[in-house]
Image (cartoon, rainbow, N blue to C red):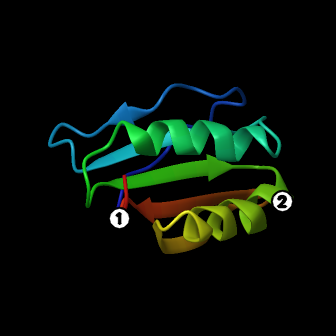
Amino acid sequence: MPGPISSSTTSSPAAPSPSGDHVDLDLTGEVCPYTFVRTRLALEDLALGAQLAVLVDHEPARRNLPRSAADWGQEVVSVDQVAPGRWRVTLRKRVK
């Protein structure tokens, strides 16, 4: 499971783990469809099997991001509420 994600209120670039097996992407303050666009761009840079943990605070993104990623062929590992109004969507890259 990825480690904690910063509580920043503005989006930040994807931050890889030291091992490169997962990346944290803070998209708080972003709304759909930008959450999916930025998530897709981050996933494209990852190796197959790597995980991407995306922090969102836009409730529609909590629903739409996992659905869109699954439609694209990526694995939805989990969707967890990490604080009131904040969710971590964890994806595993399965397709290029």
Please tell me which of labels 1 and 2 falls first in the chain. 2
Does residue 96 appear left or right of residue 81 in this picture?
A: left
Q: Residue 45: percent from the left, percent from the top?
A: 36, 36
Number of marks in the rendered image:
2
User: Is residue 20 at least partly visible in the picture?
Assistant: yes
Element carrying mark 1: loop
Measuring from the top left, give residue 37's x and y in whole percent: 66, 39
- Tell me the kind of residue under disc 2: Glu
Q: Is residue 57 left or right of residue 4?
A: right
Q: Residue beneath label 2, please?
A: 59
Dot in front, 1 or 2: 1
Residue 81 seen in render:
no
The amino acid sitting under disc 1 is Arg
Label 1, on which residue? Answer: 94
What is the CA distance from the residue labelled 1 to the residue labelled 2? 25 Å
Which residue appears at 37% of the width and 52% of the height? Answer: 96
**Crowd class of label 2 (few under 14; some 14 to 19; many from 20; radius 10 Å):** few
Check the image and report above or below for 68 versus 42: below
Q: Is residue 82 above or below residue 16?
A: below
Q: In the rendered view of the protein, which quadrant contains the N terminus?
A: bottom left
In the rendering, which numbered label is found on residue 16?
Answer: none
Q: Is residue 41 depicted above or below 66 in this figure?
A: above
Q: Residue at x 70, y 26 (%)?
A: 10
Q: Nearer the viewer, residue 32 or 15?
A: 32
Which of the two residues, 88 or 31, is positioned nearer the viewer here? 31
Q: Secondary structure at mark 2?
A: helix
